[in-house]
Amino acid sequence: MPVDIPMTTLADGTAMPLIGFGTSSLKGRAGCEAITNALHAGYRLVDTAAQYGNEAAVGEAIRTSGIDPEQVLVTTKIAGGDQGRGTTERGLRESLRRLGLERVFLTLIHWPNPSRGLALETWRELIELRDAGLTEHIGVSNFRPEQLQELIDATGVTPEVNQIQLSPALPRHSSVAFHREKGIVTEAWGPLGGREQLSDQFAVQKVAAKRGVSAAQVCLRWAVDQGIVAIPKASSAARQAANLDLTSIHLDDEDRRLLDSVDLGEERAWDSREHEEW
Ligand SMILES: NC(=O)c1ccc[n+]([C@@H]2O[C@H](COP(=O)([O-])OP(=O)(O)OC[C@H]3O[C@@H](n4cnc5c(N)ncnc54)[C@H](OP(=O)(O)O)[C@@H]3O)[C@@H](O)[C@H]2O)c1
């Protein structure tokens, strides 16, 4: 890799970058160019989903980047409407067709969507699809600890990753602790806390000013220091590069105490017992 990206490991020992690139809303030609820039900046973990409508743009960016596709770790997600027996396989095969890939690095169940009760069947099928080689690793997104436990109890197979809404504004302590106990890698979506206006918070600005970096870089360093994978999305090359440039940033206890003060509480996170996506 051209830049030094900190790494974590999945339960089976596979290395995974702690900073990846989020792609939601990056579509079409402009989206493809932004994703290509990100690959050239050094990102090697790319997060997409059937629901984002941009898998073709991600595939095109990988093909035209000049980078060995084997070096690019793609995550996609099973959409709510594809959950269930047979439909999960069809959904993943459609994602692979749009991406132009034979397999992806990681496939996640996008949301548990409890009203349909299909998460467990979907998980069983993902286990088979991993065995069949269509996806190297499998996990979930937006699952609460009890929703994860249900999958584990029923199948004996623990999701390798849970991608959840997480930033200093929503530190998700109980989920992160549960993941650690089970050997699940925590991945943060919305890591810059834009929905929570996190960069306007005095505490974040104070740490950023003290360290001479941006609020975004403070949030990303905070996640990486906990072994949490963060997948910031940025359109411009300058922000993409800045979000990857964390090696010289060090947060101390005083910084972490300040960042603790912006915690809005678990109830402010989107609640996957009620929030569903299709
Ligand atoms: N699993 C799920 O349910 C789920 C849900 C939401 C998102 N995701 C994934 O997570 C990724 C990231 O989440 P997100 O896109 O919601 O939020 P995010 O990455 O926290 O924030 C993205 C926003 O921050 C801006 N930004 C990026 N870098 C910046 C910087 N250095 N300084 C100031 N602003 C900066 C971006 O602006 P510009 O683009 O204009 O640069 C964009 O408006 C998504 O792209 C998607 O892949 C997953």
Image (cartoon, grey):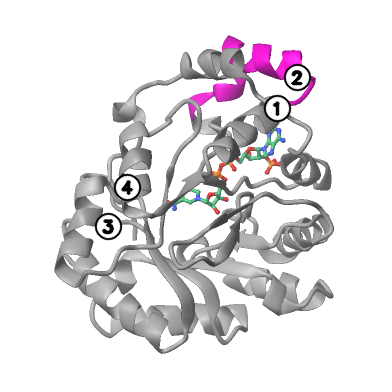
Tell me which corner region of the image, top left, top right, bottom left or bottom right, holds residue 218.
top right
Q: In terms of secondary structure, where does tag 2 sit? A: helix
Of marks 3 and 2, which one's residue comes earlier in the chain? 3
Q: Would residue 85 appear left or right of 80 to someone viewing this image?
A: left
Dot label at residue 211? 2
Q: In terms of secondary structure, where does tag 4 sit? A: helix
Residue 172 versus residue 31 in the image, above or below? above
Figure label count: 4
Tell me which corner region of the image, top left, top right, bottom left or bottom right, holds residue 177.
top left
Return the residue at label 4.
181
Which residue is found at the position 76% from the left and 56% from the top? Answer: 38
- Whether the residue carrying mark 2 lies under 8 Å from ligand 1 is answered with no
User: Which label lies toward us, 2 or 1?
Assistant: 1
Dot label at residue 65? none
Are dots 2 and 1 in contact, CB under 8 Å?
A: yes
Return the residue at label 1.
250
Q: Position of residue 61 (x, y in %)?
A: 74, 70
Question: How far separated are the C-alphas under marks 2 and 4?
Answer: 32 Å
**Magenta segment:** 196-214
Which residue is found at the position 50% from the left and 45% from the top? Answer: 189
Q: Position of residue 45 (x, y in %)?
A: 63, 61
Is 78 included in the stretch rendered in magenta?
no
Q: In terms of secondary structure, where does tag 1 sit? A: loop
Dot label at residue 112? 3
